[in-house]
């Protein structure tokens, strides 16, 4: 196949952002069509170059085709949407019923989350696995908070180990997600500013005193509401086909949830903290897009260098 | 004035269901068949055929399957499902009603009311 046709198919593949096996199938199908058309044009008397040029003109814009195919495939069914929303709903129930106080429930939740994440990663990373994957970052945050309670000597030993392990896990999960679609990475990171907002409201670093417990107890219904809102956002995200609408949904939902935290905690989340979290949230949404560009650029350069060699 | 491309886009799903009603076909074959049966009227950007086919497949109206041609080259054949056939019957009825109503307006002489 002519290099220009390979590049054309490569552009479509880069913009599909679907399941890798689905992508391979689609590209193969388009490739057979293009081969047929080029062959027909050559038989009609066109040179290889003319046939290729005419074929691409007849086929249309690679980006537009990829976008339309993405929209045909991207919509999840209700079962997938419910499955994706389940981790948020489980945490919503945990706070709504005030079971957050029992370490046993947290252990059960973590076991379920890890079990489902490994199942999903093993079965080709379906769309619904990404919100579950995001929750594997929660123990990292909790472990970070617990570091404050270590004796001084242990603290200095534990911090470098924690930083190395936490960075590796965060980098691994984000990279794995970006390789599929940067938008899933943004989806996965959506709870981070919301949970950070609640942590800032509760201020657990002053020690797990009865005052802190009472504070969490008082805010528990609103924390539960945040998780239910996250679940509804995920359902809407999976049911929407268009990418731009999905981006808009994540930004609006994130800002609304931060506003809700600020409103129902009677100013415990002040304006500076709100603004910092809102900026951090936009950063968390946009950084994956930037990283995806870098990764794909790197991959393209690597492929080109292999071809040259 | 409405461009031909827009008219085709609005009716592409029905056209594809109708074409596939006769026999299973692969993408390139569908393009050729559409062009042949419409005497060259239905010509459009070929790449846009696939999003439409995949959309129909996701809706359960058509089903795709890889098959080998006699020359050993694989092609993805699409065929109508029972749901697709029911939809086509429905679309045909709607289209004939519409056509009939249009004729009554454009050719008032044929109106026997």
Image (tube, coloured by chain):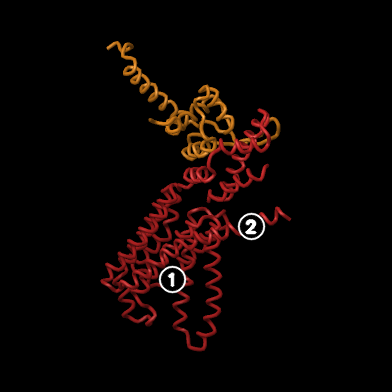
Q: Chain of mark 1?
A: A
Q: Is A224 left, or right, of A59 in this rendering?
A: left
| Residue A238 horizontal/vertical position (percent) | 43, 51
Q: CA distance from mark 2 to mark 1?
A: 50 Å
Quarter of the figure with the N terminus of chain A: top right
Q: Chain of mark 2?
A: A
Occupied quadrant, residue A268: bottom left
Q: Residue furthest left?
A: A266
| SS state under label 1 | helix
In front: mark 2 or mark 1? Answer: 2
Q: Residue A301, which numbered label?
A: 2
Q: Residue furthest right?
A: A309
Please report the residue visible at 27 percent of the width from the left and 12 percent of the height from the top: B113
- The one nearer the camera, A26 or A191, is A26
| Residue A273 horizontal/vertical position (percent) | 35, 72
Q: Residue A104, which numbered label?
A: 1
Tell me the orange chain: B
Please report the residue visible at 57 percent of the width from the left and 60 percent of the height from the top: A295
Occupied quadrant, residue B26: top right
Q: Is residue A292 visible?
A: yes
Quarter of the figure with the C terminus of chain A: bottom right
Residue A191 against residue B51 in the figure, above or below: below
| Residue A76 horizontal/vertical position (percent) | 45, 48
Residue B49 against residue A20 in the figure, above or below: above
Residue A49 against residue A253 in the figure, above or below: above
Tell me the red chain: A
| SS state under label 2 | helix
């Amino acid at each position: 196949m002519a290099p220009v046709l390979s590049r054309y198919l490569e552009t479509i593949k880069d913009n599909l952002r679907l399941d890798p096996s689905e992508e391979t199938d689609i590209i193969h199908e388009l490739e057979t069509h293009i081969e047929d058309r080029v062959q027909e044009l050559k038989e009609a008397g066109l040179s290889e170059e003319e046939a290729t040029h005419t074929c691409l003109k007849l086929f249309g814009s690679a980006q537009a085709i990829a976008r339309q195919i993405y929209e045909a495939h991207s919509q999840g069914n209700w079962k997938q949407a419910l499955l994706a929303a389940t981790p948020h709903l489980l945490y919503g129930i945990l706070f709504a019923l005030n079971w957050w106080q029992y370490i046993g429930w947290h252990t059960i939740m973590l076991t379920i989350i890890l079990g489902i994440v490994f199942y999903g990663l093993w079965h080709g990373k379906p769309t619904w696995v990404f919100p579950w994957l995001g929750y594997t970052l929660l123990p990292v945050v909790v472990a970070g908070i617990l570091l404050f309670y270590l004796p001084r000597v242990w603290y200095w030993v534990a911090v470098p180990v924690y930083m190395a392990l936490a960075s590796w896990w965060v980098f691994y999960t984000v990279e794995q997600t970006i390789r599929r679609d940067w938008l899933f990475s943004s989806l996965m990171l959506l709870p981070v500013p919301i949970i950070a907002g609640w942590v800032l409201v509760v201020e657990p670093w002053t020690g797990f005193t009865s005052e802190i417990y009472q504070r969490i107890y008082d805010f528990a219904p609103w924390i539960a509401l945040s998780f239910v809102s996250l679940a509804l956002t995920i359902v809407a995200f999976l049911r929407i086909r268009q990418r731009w609408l999905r981006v808009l949904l994540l930004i609006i939902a994130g800002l609304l949830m931060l506003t809700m935290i600020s409103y129902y905690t009677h100013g415990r989340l002040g304006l500076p903290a709100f603004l910092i979290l809102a900026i951090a949230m936009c950063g968390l949404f946009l950084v994956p897009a930037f990283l995806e560009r870098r990764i794909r650029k790197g991959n393209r350069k690597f492929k080109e260098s292999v071809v040259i060699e | 004035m409405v461009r031909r491309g827009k008219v085709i886009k609005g009716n592409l799903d029905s056209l594809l269901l109708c074409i596939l009603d006769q026999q299973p076909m692969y993408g390139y074959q569908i393009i050729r068949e559409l062009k042949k049966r419409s005497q060259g009227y239905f010509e459009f950007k070929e790449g846009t055929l696939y999003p439409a086919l995949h959309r129909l497949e996701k809706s359960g109206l058509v089903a795709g399957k890889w098959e080998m041609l006699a020359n050993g080259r694989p092609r993805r054949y699409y065929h109508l499902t029972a749901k697709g056939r029911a939809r086509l019957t429905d679309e045909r009825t709607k289209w004939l009603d519409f056509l009939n109503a249009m004729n009554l307006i454009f050719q008032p002489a044929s109106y026997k009311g």
